[in-house]
Image: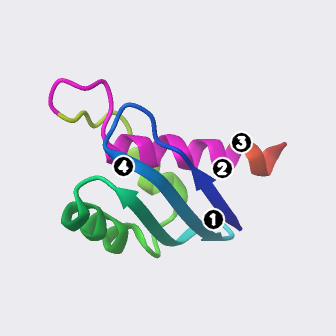
Amino acid sequence: MHFTYRPRGVCSQLMEIETEGSTLKSLTVLGGCDGNLQGISRLVEGMEIQQVIQRLEGIRCGYKDSSCPDQLARALKALLAEQQA
């Protein structure tokens, strides 16, 4: 399944997520800290979606209420909610 998410309150502008069943197959993030987001993308590829959410949810970026990893967790929750609808 292909899913597009627009992060809020962080530097990244767009997350393109590809899943296969309950596994995150690929992640591309536009904007934000390029090297860090490429690293996160490679680390989460092949992981179970629920595990990614558990590891990344609630991470903050400095004074912000969220971060790019937290926004990824939110995107994956939205993806799961859409699959169940």
**Considering the numbered disc 2 on the image, is that residue within a helix, a strand or a loop?**
helix
Numbered label attached to residue 12: 4
In the picture provided, is 42 more to the left or to the right than 46? left
Percent x, y of residue 64: 25, 26
Q: Earlier in the sequence, mark 2 or mark 4?
A: 4
Q: Which residues are magenta?
A: 62-80
Mark 1 residue crowding within 10 angstroms, few (<14) / some (14–19) / many (20+)? few
In the picture provided, is 67 more to the left or to the right than 50? left
Nearer to us of marks 2 and 4 is: 4
Label 3: which residue? Answer: 81
**Considering the numbered disc 1 on the image, is that residue within a helix, a strand or a loop?**
loop
Alpha carbons under labels 1 and 2: distance apart: 11 Å
Alpha carbons under labels 3 and 1: distance apart: 13 Å
Mark 4 residue crowding within 10 angstroms, few (<14) / some (14–19) / many (20+)? some
Percent x, y of residue 12: 36, 49
Q: Earlier in the sequence, mark 3 or mark 1?
A: 1
Label 1: which residue? Answer: 22
Alpha carbons under labels 4 and 3: distance apart: 22 Å
**Considering the numbered disc 3 on the image, is that residue within a helix, a strand or a loop?**
helix
Nearer to us of marks 3 and 1 is: 3
